[in-house]
Amino acid sequence: MSGAIDVIIIGAGASGLMCALTAGERGRKVLVLDHSDKIGAKILMSGGRRCNFTNLFIEPEYYLSANPHFCKSALKRFTQWDFITMVESHGIQYHEREHGQLFCDDSARNILDMLLAECDQAGVTIQNRCTISTITKPEDASPFHLTTNRGHFEAQSLVIATGGLSIPTMGYHGFGHEIALQFGMQIVPLKAGLVPFMFSDRYKAVFERLSGLALEATLTTEQQSFTENILFTHRGLSGPAVLQLSNYWQPGDSIKVNLLPNINLEQRLLTAKQEHPKRQLNNQLTQQLAKNLVQELERIFWPTWANKPMAEIPDAILSEIAENLQNWRLKPSATEGYRTAEVTIGGVDTEQLSSKTMQSTTQQGLYFIGEVVDIAGYLGGFNFQWAWSSGYAAGQYV
């Protein structure tokens, strides 16, 4: 690009593009560098390729961070309503799903094309297939110097929008965290978030046989509880409730599963025994649960009473079975890790960032936005909104 560069942004994902178009609209000369062949790959694959681009119910309590107050400033200054206004101004049709999630009617490409069009209108230059070998800043007053396979670039403002460690096949390998460490910043310990559970005990084979079955359930740890769908997989458990709970799970922790939330199963079974004494328990439970699931549960919790009429099952046993189905204690062996994680928990320590500008407090002119920062949202558009809000915040000041 010709002429002096004011701002270099590393990463052409959601936060990087938002920062670029915001800074470009202010008249800043912006260059976005990205290592990948395809710009905005994570946007394109998100939400089943429909892009769950935000949520109607964005609140700070739906974000995890060592500093839970940090996200408030950015989220307040660029809200979900601001992004929805941009979407509507481009004529993009969208719809609401459960829990306030907003998706494109057509394709995630609509969101990427919107961002690229806004960047183009703001005079932003985007260079992909760019590998950065060194970043230096000789003195406080001097610009950042970047050596790349595309040439040498300089700018007074450098924005790191490289994402986290999630989905490494897309090329996210912690480069942004390395830059933070290079400039004397701290990293809050990292772990995979919004990720399925795996099992290595006797339940692994059970879940393999149930693979593909989904149902609504309540999952609980000591810290949190979620009631949404769960999905049995050949590795263990997935689905929205599982992904949400994984953000709070620690290795070695057990989880509790309520397969029939919002009903008093004990009372229902005792009443059914009185009203239908000849009915078998598995036939009673298949009124609420899938037949193959009930068969597996029967082998686990009441094999002695299989094929017996409910009249022959003592009330105490029925109460125990109800308790097991509504407080099924499971112990995941691990999560599936960054390979399938939707977000990275942890990241650049917010204690060393300005919540207003996203600028480092240890290095003037250096900014961090999006997933590379120690902010991780719930499932359902919250992480995209953090990308839009943090990108906008930095774009106002770079």
Image (tube, rainbow, N blue to C red):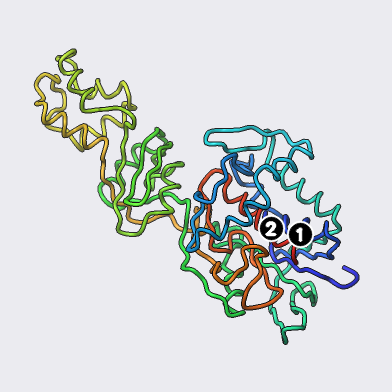
For this view, does 195 lie left or right of residue 80?
A: left
- Say few, some or many: other residues with alpha carbon within 10 Å of mark 1 (under 14 / 14 to 19 / 20 or more): many
Q: Residue at x 31, y 51 (%)?
A: 222
Residue type marked 2: Gly
Element type at marker 1? helix
The image position of residue 243, as x and y in percent, is 45, 47
Residue 326 to residue 200: above or below = above
Snapshot quadrant of residue 94: top right
Is residue 68 left or right of 38 when viewed as pictured? left
Q: Residue at x 16, y 31 (%)?
A: 319
Question: Please, what is the three-letter code of the amino acid marked with disc 1?
Answer: Ala
Q: Position of residue 373 (x, y in %)?
A: 57, 63
Q: Quadrant of the N terminus?
A: bottom right
Q: Residues within 10 Å of mark 2 (few under 14, many from 20)?
A: many
For residue 391, the mark is 2
Which residue is located at x 65 percent, y 58 percent?
390
Q: CA distance from mark 1 to mark 2?
A: 8 Å
In the foreground, 203 or 101: 101
Q: Nearer the viewer, residue 114 or 68?
A: 68
The tag earlier along the polypeptide, 1 or 2, is 1
Which residue position is annotated with label 1? 20
Furthest residue in direction bottom, as rendered: 138
